[in-house]
Image (cartoon, rainbow, N blue to C red):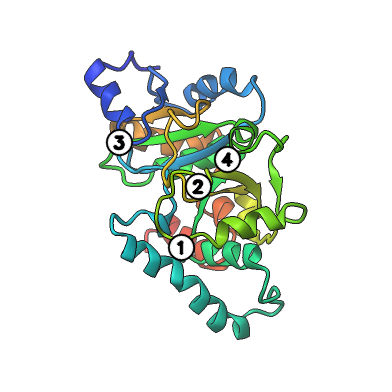
Amino acid sequence: MAGTLTRTTLARFQIAARCTVVRTPVESFTDFAEVVAPWAEGGTLWFRGHGNARWSLCPGALRHRRAAKRAAALDLFDRFRERALSKLASPPGLDDNLQWAGIAQHYGLPTRLLDWTTKPFVALHFALEHPDEDGAVYMMNPTELNRAADPRHHGVLSGSKDRLVAEKYLGLGATLQPGGLPPIAIRPLWNCPRIEAQDGVFTIHGDKYFAMTGRLVPSLVCIPIRRRFKAKLSKSLVAVGGLSLTSIYPELEYLCRALRHAAGV
């Protein structure tokens, strides 16, 4: 395992989320597992990988600086639902915004949802993208997140049982409100092979603040992934962890891509 981060390097990893940063970067699958293990003893953790450590923990629709741009991104949701209705074999009801948001997020539309996973090595896979940039794996306790949002929440919300809570969030606007709603953690109602393969879960971000930080989410922790170790980590992840492109993306498109890559064509 590599040496402790310098203060300058540590500060770089603290910029995006202003949270606790693990001081020792990892070089291998085994190193990563050893770093995660002590934190996992404290309860359920969710993970998210960033190929670029400068990226914030903010959903796609809320990343724009201008409120007009955020509003335009959120407005895409209704247009997506109208046009996608005829393209799905079993579409949700038009009033089931949570299922529609999950589908839209899955296919790349910017929404109020932020993807997480319960599998740390899936998050590591995404952190290894963009090989010329330092990456990061974030982990947080979803139960603590929900309890901070509302003491009546005793765990991760369910897409089936807590639909009304989710609907309230999905109906919010594009501007920050001092007395608004903070992010909450919820398990998706709509499953698909990719979400199941990645053990995908979501945070829904309200209008109190858009990006998650350590000040607002005390359980948030960053594991630095240095760019000089990414190639080695990628090989280690496949050789030891058994994780590959097709295990992350089970669709046939990615099977073909993996076969072409292996054959060098």
Q: Amino acid at mark 1?
A: Arg
Q: Nearer the viewer, residue 7 or 205?
A: 205
Examine the image and state in which quarter residue 15 appears.
top left
- When the figure is inspected, residue 110 is found, relative to residue 84, above or below; the finding is above
Q: Amino acid at mark 4?
A: Gly
Q: Residue at x 30, y 40 (%)?
A: 54
Inter-mark Cα distance, 2 to 3: 33 Å
Residue 63 screen position, x and y as percent: 36, 53
Marks 4, 3: nearer the viewer? 3
Counting residues from the N terminus, which is met first, the one under dot 1 or under dot 3? 3
Asked if one can make out residue 238 in the rendered structure from this viewpoint, the answer is no
Q: Which mark is residue 157?
A: none
Q: Which mark is residue 242?
A: 4
Q: Dot 2 corresponds to which residue?
A: 180
Q: Residues within 10 Å of mark 4 (few under 14, many from 20)?
A: few
Task: Using residue 58 as the reference point, say whether residue 150 is left or right of it.
Answer: right
Please identify the quadrant where the C terminus is shown.
Answer: bottom left
Counting residues from the N terminus, which is met first, the one under dot 4 or under dot 2? 2
Marks 2, 3: nearer the viewer? 2
Marks 1, 2: nearer the viewer? 2
Counting residues from the N terminus, which is met first, the one under dot 2 or under dot 3? 3
Residue 131 screen position, x and y as percent: 30, 43
Residue at the front extreme, as displayed:
179
Q: Secondary structure at mark 3?
A: loop
Inter-mark Cα distance, 4 to 3: 23 Å
Inter-mark Cα distance, 4 to 2: 43 Å
Counting residues from the N terminus, which is met first, the one under dot 4 or under dot 3? 3
Residue at the left extreme, as displayed:
8
Marks 4, 2: nearer the viewer? 2
Q: Which mark is residue 134?
A: 3
